[in-house]
Image (spheres, rainbow, N blue to C red):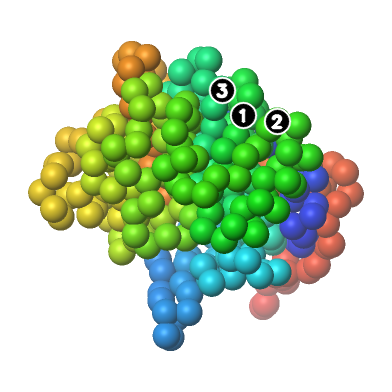
């Protein structure tokens, strides 16, 4: 069986956002049913704190697959021609353990991360949520507009990032891409004023979203920080919100947005309401009122990468995409 190498451009073509949102919902339910293995990621910091090399293995019973994402994370790539996340997702079949796909990890990560936020928003944001705020102007910022438009009737977007040239260019391009008004704001506070949905998609190590700015009934997707030593939300923002996560185990080990308030003694482990997968299964309630502030803390999970890459591989086989290479294969038994 050949192994297909699938490029970023092919991933974007084969994995539409609405399809990926449904795939993420299924993957999170599979995890919640204990039908998947999702170990904590292993990461090493590179010399001079230039970046991180992360390893994320996992397996699923539905679809039956296992594999590994290996990805470098270089935050300083923001504003350059290089993705901040680069690497590959390796997908294996479960009968003989043969590798069947090597898929561009940057494209998979961009789409599945925003799609997971789409699942959370579909479950937690108010039905009539229309005003969207985006903090950040990179790949995840764009992907999150696409995901939010897919699950709520977004009528207006405000965006903030620290570079005025980049944020204006981002706003102009987003208007053309999504057909909704997009305003570039001079501050994070101005961007989130009156927002029904807020997505934080930055590489900031210090809080840039403050609890004082959150209005009753809003929903927040916090996705930019996936390490213990960085956070995008201040303690007040977390305290004001009902906190839902993709995986409790990952949150208590890796999420700076949760761990900083915990270290300060501002909250305890009971502040985590539960996992999105449990809402999907009907074993955990979601939003309780139109005035409640909800928060989804996303760290990204190997099962999300696997579900997306498995689908992309199947579509590549169906459409003839990808470049076949030979890895491993059958061998003759020696006498």
Q: Which numbered disc flags the more N-terminal residue, 2 or 1?
A: 1
The relative height of residue 30 versus residue 40 in the rendered view (above or below) is above
Kindly indicate whether the residue at mark 1 contacts the one at mark 3 (C-beta within 8 angstroms).
Answer: yes
Q: Residue at x 70, y 53 (%)?
A: 169
Kindly indicate whether the residue at mark 1 contacts the one at mark 2 (C-beta within 8 angstroms).
Answer: yes
- Which residue does the numbered mark 3 point to in the structure image? 130
Query: The C terminus is located in which quarter?
Result: bottom right
- Which residue does the numbered mark 1 point to in the structure image? 156
Q: Position of residue 60 (x, y in %)?
A: 51, 43
Neighbourhood count class around disc 3 (C-alpha, 10 Å): few under 14, some 14–19, many 20 upward:
some
Q: Which mark is residue 326?
A: none
Outermost residue toward the bottom? Answer: 47
Q: Position of residue 36 (x, y in %)?
A: 45, 42
Neighbourhood count class around disc 2 (C-alpha, 10 Å): few under 14, some 14–19, many 20 upward:
some
For mark 2, give the secondary structure.
Answer: loop
Answer yes or no: is residue 208 visible. yes
The relative height of residue 242 versus residue 289 in the rendered view (above or below) is below
Q: Which numbered disc flags the more N-terminal residue, 2 or 3?
A: 3
Outermost residue toward the front? Answer: 186
Q: Residue at x 63, y 24 (%)?
A: 155
Residue 215, image quadrant: top left
Rounded to the nearest angstrom, the CA distance separating label 2 from label 1 is 6 Å
- Which residue does the numbered mark 2 point to in the structure image? 180
Q: Residue at x 64, y 58 (%)?
A: 166
165 or 235: nearer the eye? 165
Answer yes or no: is residue 34 visible. no
Q: Which numbered disc flags the more N-terminal residue, 3 or 1?
A: 3
The relative height of residue 214 versus residue 231 in the rendered view (above or below) is above
Rounded to the nearest angstrom, the CA distance separating label 2 from label 3 is 11 Å
- Drawn side of residue 262 relative to residue 146, left or right: left
């Amino acid at each position: 069986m050949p192994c297909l190498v699938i490029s970023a451009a092919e991933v974007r073509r084969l994995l539409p956002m609405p399809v990926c949102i449904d795939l993420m919902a299924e993957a999170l339910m599979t995890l919640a049913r204990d039908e998947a293995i999702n170990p904590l990621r292993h990461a090493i910091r590179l010399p001079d704190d230039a970046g991180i090399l992360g390893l994320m293995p996992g397996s699923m019973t539905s679809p039956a697959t296992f594999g590994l994402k290996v990805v470098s994370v270089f935050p300083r790539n923001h504003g350059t021609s290089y993705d901040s996340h680069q690497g590959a997702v390796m997908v294996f079949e479960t009968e003989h353990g043969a590798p069947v796909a090597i898929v561009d990890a940057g494209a998979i990560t961009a789409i599945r991360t925003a799609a997971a936020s789409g699942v959370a928003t579909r479950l937690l944001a108010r039905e009539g949520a229309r005003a969207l705020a985006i903090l950040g102007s990179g790949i995840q910022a764009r992907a999150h507009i696409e995901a939010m438009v897919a699950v709520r009737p977004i009528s207006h977007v405000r965006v903030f990032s620290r570079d005025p040239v980049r944020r204006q260019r981002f706003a102009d391009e987003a208007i053309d891409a999504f057909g909704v008004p997009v305003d570039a704001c001079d501050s994070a506070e101005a961007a989130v004023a009156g927002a029904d949905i807020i997505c934080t998609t930055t590489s900031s190590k210090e809080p840039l979203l403050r609890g004082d700015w959150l209005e009753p009934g809003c929903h927040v997707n916090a996705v930019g920080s996936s390490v213990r030593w960085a956070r995008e939300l201040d303690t007040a923002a977390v305290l004001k919100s009902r906190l839902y996560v993709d995986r409790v185990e990952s949150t208590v080990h890796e999420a700076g947005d949760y761990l900083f308030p915990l270290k300060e003694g501002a909250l305890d482990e009971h502040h985590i309401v539960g996992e999105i997968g449990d809402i999907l299964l009907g074993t955990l309630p979601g939003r309780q009122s139109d005035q409640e502030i909800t928060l989804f803390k996303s760290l990204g999970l190997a099962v999300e990468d696997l579900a997306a890459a498995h689908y992309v591989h199947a579509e590549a086989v169906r459409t003839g995409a990808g470049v076949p290479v030979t890895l491993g294969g059958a061998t003759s038994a020696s006498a």
